Image: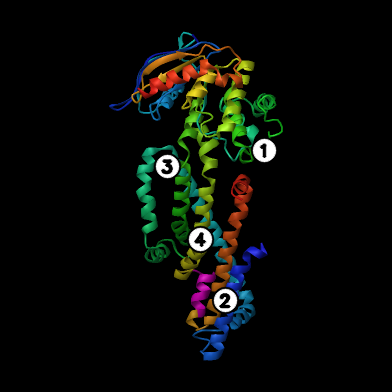
Amino acid sequence: MIRRLAPSLSLVLGLLVTWQVAVTVTGVAPQVLPSPLRVVEQGWAFRAELWANTVPTLQVTAIGFAVSLAVAWAAAVAVDFSPWLRRALTPLLVASQTLPVIAIAPLLIIWFGFGLLPKVLVIALVTFFPVAVGLIEGFAATDRSATALLRSMGASRWQRFRLVRLPGAMPSFFTSLRIAVTYAVTGAIFAEFVGARAGLGIFMQLQRNQFRTDLVLAAVGVTAALSVALFGATYLVQRLVTPWYREDHR
Amino acid sequence: MKVSVRGLSVAYGDRPVLDSVSLEVGTGEFVSLVGPSGCGKSTLFGALTGILDGATVSGTIQVDGEPVRGAPFGYMPQQDLLFPWRSVLDNTTLGLEVAGVSRREARERARALFEPFGLGGFEQARPGELSGGMRQRAALLRTVVGGREVLLLDEPFGALDALTRTAMQEWLESMRERYGWTTLLITHDVREAAFLSDRVVALSPRPAGVRRVVPVDLPRPRTRSMLTDPGIAAVEAELLDVLRS
């Protein structure tokens, strides 16, 4: 694990050192560009506040992503069973991804207020599409001869789904899950940016208004750490759900 | 006759694939189908197992003199199609599971065949851990464990290297001898067809029709030494002749 992370860790370290040296040498004002050490130092000093704002962001992310996953699964399974639904839903799925979230999010606040719902909707809007497409294509990628084999055994459509299409779609699902989960945290931050009572998004905006660039960057660091942690968690879940996949792709 | 196919024609739209194919397989007989690539051999199996979508099928298929009822055919496709998310044992019970047999009983029935199929000790292995020959044996085990009356083998050894293939042909012959399977085999390999079969049906290019039925008059069980028997060579020569004309 350590050995595998070593290249990226040393690259990050190198960038941070360069940044630190550049700030020290040029003497640029911390309001414009604080040094990484200052970001860490101030982030630590404001840890209670950062944490208090991280919890609501995590909550919103978890709820929004859970809703998104549930809807994506339902839609993907429905599409897999019904060619009519496939034709009906596919354009809508694509359209959902082309919506300019930056324009829609403020409207959602107007419609649904500052509560949980508009944020959940923003997260769902940005994460739903990759998961749904990953699942739909995962199901559809089932080997035709596997279908023929199951049918020759007299398997019903549901049996074919349960025994072949569903497990066969898992690698594709987890790939799409990884893409979506990285959008989920930024989606939450963005939704909070537009309007929230607490959360990393609103924290960043408040600090920016007070020219606390160091605290904005500290919050950015927390956001990145969250995304990376969730990304890593998908591998753990995958290993639990599809232990065979690892063995076959060593 | 166990299986009798009469005047079977299959077309997709106005594109004919099978043109009035007739053939018969007696109980315990081994009949092979040889023909050029893409001539529609696999479509014939599709028609027997009733899985052709959007095709126009005419002609009659009878099993024991009656129209097909239930699922008398055990189909083994070209690829072994062992699913990586199931152990070898659970792959072989797939058909039983589909048929609603309890998992425990299905496993018991499949487990009993692992020794005779040369797979003893690999029940809990993942398919990826098996060699090519073992994978085909596992796929055949999955096909026969359902107790279907007729086996349809679609180029089961096509993807194996020549040495393994020869070993598998001998093995299949010994298993057939032991269990008395009624078998239809699709193959590209005329020597394989001659070695294993009681009769070989040579098909024409698409739309496939029966060009000739060549009987193989050699005693059973067939053994490796018969591969060089003049009888086999004569059948082979005749088949190649028919297929090339």
SS of the residue at dot 3? helix
Task: Name the residue rendered at 54%, 70% in the picture.
Answer: A200
Q: Closer to us: mark 2 or mark 1?
A: 1
Residue at the image position 36 percent from the left and 39 percent from the top: A84
Residue A198 seen from this side = no
Residue that badge 4 annotates: A184
Any part of residue A87 in sight: yes
The answer to whether B47 is drawn above or below residue A25 in the figure is above
Return the chain for callout 3. A
Please, what is the three-letter code of the amino acid marked with disc 4?
Answer: Ala
Q: Residue at x 60, y 51 (%)?
A: A238
Please give the chain letter of the residue carrying mark 2. A
State whether discs 4 and 1 lie on one chain: no
Residue A218's mark? 2
Rendered location of residue B145, percent (x, y):
61, 23
Q: Quadrant of residue B127?
A: top right
> What amino acid is at disc 1?
Ala
> Within the magenta stretch, is there residue A7?
no
- Mark 2 residue type: Ala
Amino acid type shown at disc 3: Val
Which one is in front in this view, the residue at disc 4 or the one at disc 1? 1
The alpha-carbon separation of the residues under discs 3 and 2 comes to 43 Å
Query: Does label 3 or label 2 sit earlier along the sequence?
Result: 3
Segment tinted magenta in the rendering: A196-207
The Cα–Cα distance between marks 4 and 1, rounded to whole angstroms, is 38 Å
Q: Which numbered disc flags the more N-terminal residue, 3 or 4?
A: 3
The residue identified by callout 3 is: A79
C-beta proximity under 8 Å, tags 3 and 2 = no
